[in-house]
Image: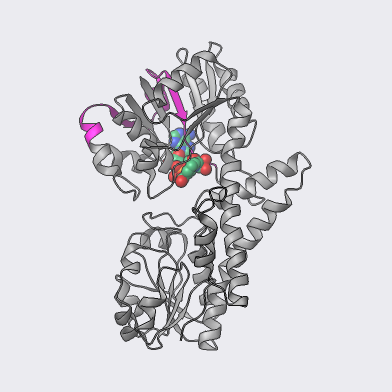
Amino acid sequence: MNIAVIGTGYVGLVSGVCYAELGHDVYCVDKDPAKVELLQGGEVPIYEPGLQPLMRSNADAGRLKFTTDTATAIAGAEVVIIAVGTPPLPNGEADMQYIEVAAKEIGEAMNGYKVICVKSTVPVGTNERVRAIIADYYKGSFDNASVPEFLREGTAVQDTMNPDRVVFGTESKHAASLLTELHAPLTKEIVVTDIRSAEMIKYASNAFLATKISFINEIANICEKVGADVSEVAKGMGYDRRIGASFLRAGIGYGGSCFPKDTKALIQIAGNVAYDFKLLKAVVEVNQHQRYGVLDKLFNALGTLKGKTIAVWGLAFKPETDDVRESPALEIVDRLIALGAVPKVYDPVALESFRKVYDDPAMMWCQSAQEAIQGSDALCLLTEWKEFVEFDLAAIEAALANPILIDGRNVYSYEAVKGTGLSYYPVGRPVHH
Ligand code: NAD
């Protein structure tokens, strides 16, 4: 199959590479010339495990090409996949400007029948809007499909090659059979539905996962007050197949480019049809508040933050990614500075992406985990990178000026902590002195 992918971000690039890996001819297009130059040179502009070798081998085999020109990319394509960003507007609604520009460019470049798919996460009705824009410029026949994406950054290649399910919505039998053929090698679980339901499945899925996280975080907050241990509670709950063990890990809340924006967008989508999505509003509020727990614990431990150096381990919103969009670390570091502390920050891959969106003369940028803790008044672990999980706790104690460890992701066991003189503050589990 000849496939064009519009936008080479986390979703577009990974999808394009994986379709090529399945043996298809893929042409990826991006507006950003610097990105395309890197890609043409065999470099991956993002950090995503396993992506670079797969991209190179498919480019070398001639199945994967990159361009800045939409017309070049779609000229020979039967399937066109739109994977541009849909970032949040200040009111929480998804910003449709990139989708609309991409649709216009596709419309202007159409040269025959194609199936136009929207993979970006978009409000219900967007595929119809994309169809209308293309039809303004192109009078020939074409079909539409909503093909929402469920990959997770950090395991994006694995998720794309082995998805739990593939969902697409289309009114066209031809499009349905073409997309089934395209995705059949990946999974048996293919949900074919109408366009509006497919658009909704994506938002509903992310909203549900975010709800699970906020739910367990609230249970954690209660555990702290009643002396229970949320990791034991989650374990006991998770064995129940009706509940499931995943997404029951208490911590400092979700971040990233999807959950925060998709939950807020769904609240807006509901609001636009006069529905007050009370449950999801609470999920967002709980998540926002959860990150401040780190600061409360620092106050408890240190009395004041003024003039204190605080080691911050982890800036990415989760491990195995350089993505810092909506990372809880952004607000925590910002608050630390506002409260007069000096954050000494370190992340194995996200230092540069963090610096691009947040910089302050009060911060100290560290090149290693050790440098961050050396002489600091406390350590806050905000991202559960393997490097931090495996760090010797005795070495943490030895390096810190005050042996205070705030574990925002519950990565350390009491067994490991007990042998040290650390004051250990996890989330939803008893403090250990
Ligand atoms: P991203 O911001 O990383 O990438 C978007 C890319 O599109 C950028 O490189 C940009 O230059 C390019 N672009 C914008 N307009 C263009 C145009 N007209 N022509 C060509 N290129 C254009 O975004 P992302 O994280 O890959 O997300 C893309 C979409 O997928 C979003 O709607 C997002 O919600 C959804 N999604 C993301 C994830 C994730 O984990 N990142 C997972 C599932 C779904």
What x and y, as percent, mark residue 285? 66, 60
Front residue of 142 and 424: 424
The answer to whether 381 appears left or right of 45 in the picture is right
Residue drawn at (61%, 53%), measured in percent from left and top?
A: 211
Q: Quadrant of the N terminus?
A: top left
Q: Which residues are magenta?
A: 57-86
Residue at coordinates 40% horizontally, 66% vertically from top-left?
A: 314
Count the labels in the image: 0
Relative to residue 387, is residue 108 depicted above or below? Answer: above
Q: Residue at x 43, y 58 (%)?
A: 318
Q: Is residue 59 magenta?
A: yes
Does the image show residue 122?
A: no
Horizontal and vertical percent position of residue 148: 51, 34
In which quarter of the view is residue 424 placed?
Answer: bottom left
- Front in this rendered view, residue 151 or 27: 151
User: Which of the two residues, 55 or 71, is positioned nearer the viewer here?
Assistant: 55
**Residue 425 to residue 246: above or below:** below
Residue 365: where, in percent of width, then height? 36, 71
* Residue 361, x across and y down, in percent: 44, 74
Residue, x 45% and y 14% (percent of image)? 111
Residue 301 horizontal side relative to residue 4, left or right: right
Residue 29 in sight here: yes
Residue 118 within the magenta-colored segment of the rendering: no
User: In the image, 362: left or right of 347?
Assistant: right
